[in-house]
Amino acid sequence: MIQFSTKTQQFYDTSLDYTDLPDDLVAIDEQQHKYFLDALNEGRYILDDFSFSPPRPHFYMTWVEGEWRDTRSDQQKQDDQKKCLLPLTRRQFKLVLLQYQLLEKIEQLIDQITDKTLKFKMEIEYQESTTFERNSESVSYMCQLLQLSDDQIDTMWQEAMNL
């Protein structure tokens, strides 16, 4: 016999031995099982009265008190956003710097680094890299030199991905 729990949003086959079962199990037939499974696969939440929520609008949304909510912290949202930012080609990276009138400025700022080892490292990173990763140490340092905020960098990065 198949049972369903709205608390866990899971099916349970009562012919199997579970160590812990939810206290809200309701027996369902094969047709209901398929109906609920289809709803879950569409990203819907099955309510206590067996009606469904609208589909989950985004992977990070959670059903809370009758609505879909993004329960991530601001830092988690920012971290997840950065994961979506693809590496840029050298062309894209330089074009976006040019677009924001920062191309000459970054070259000047790198040239002004007083620590010779760091200066050579940044010159190599800037001049020789074929791709640029949003979360790389060198990109972070260049953006720090340019005094760009994380939001500014993310905006520029998204624009550059389309160049």
Image (spheres, rainbow, N blue to C red):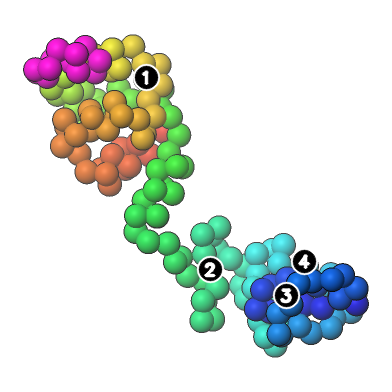
C-alpha separation, residue under disc 4 versus residue under disc 1: 45 Å
Front-lying residue, 30 or 3: 3
User: Circle 4: is it few (<14), some (14-19), or many (20+) Cα within 10 Å?
Assistant: few
Position in image of residue 59 (x %, y %):
55, 58
Q: Earlier in the sequence, mark 4 or mark 3?
A: 3
Mark 3 highlights which residue? Answer: 20
C-alpha separation, residue under disc 1 versus residue under disc 2: 38 Å
Mark linked to residue 90: 1
Front-lying residue, 85 or 18: 18
Q: Earlier in the sequence, mark 4 or mark 2?
A: 4
Mark linked to residue 38: 4
| Residue 115 sits inside the magenta stretch | yes
Looking at the image, residue 75 lies above or below residue 11: above
Locate residue 159 relative to residue 106 in the image: left or right. right
Residue drawn at x 67%, y 85% is 48
User: Circle 3: is it few (<14), some (14-19), or many (20+) Cα within 10 Å?
Assistant: few
User: Circle 1: is it few (<14), some (14-19), or many (20+) Cα within 10 Å?
Assistant: some
Task: Specify start and end residues of the magenta stretch as a single range.
Answer: 111-122
Looking at the image, residue 32 lies above or below residue 70: below
Mark linked to residue 66: none
Mark 2 highlights which residue? Answer: 62
Q: Quadrant of residue 97?
A: top left
Q: Is residue 93 visible?
A: yes
Q: Quadrant of the C terminus?
A: top left
Position in image of residue 35 (x %, y %):
81, 72
- Which residue is farthest front? 19
C-alpha separation, residue under disc 4 versus residue under disc 3: 26 Å
Q: Earlier in the sequence, mark 2 or mark 3?
A: 3
Residue contact at pointers 2 and 3, CB within 8 angstroms: no
Q: Earlier in the sequence, mark 1 or mark 3?
A: 3
Residue drawn at x 27%, y 47% is 151
| Residue 140 sits inside the magenta stretch | no
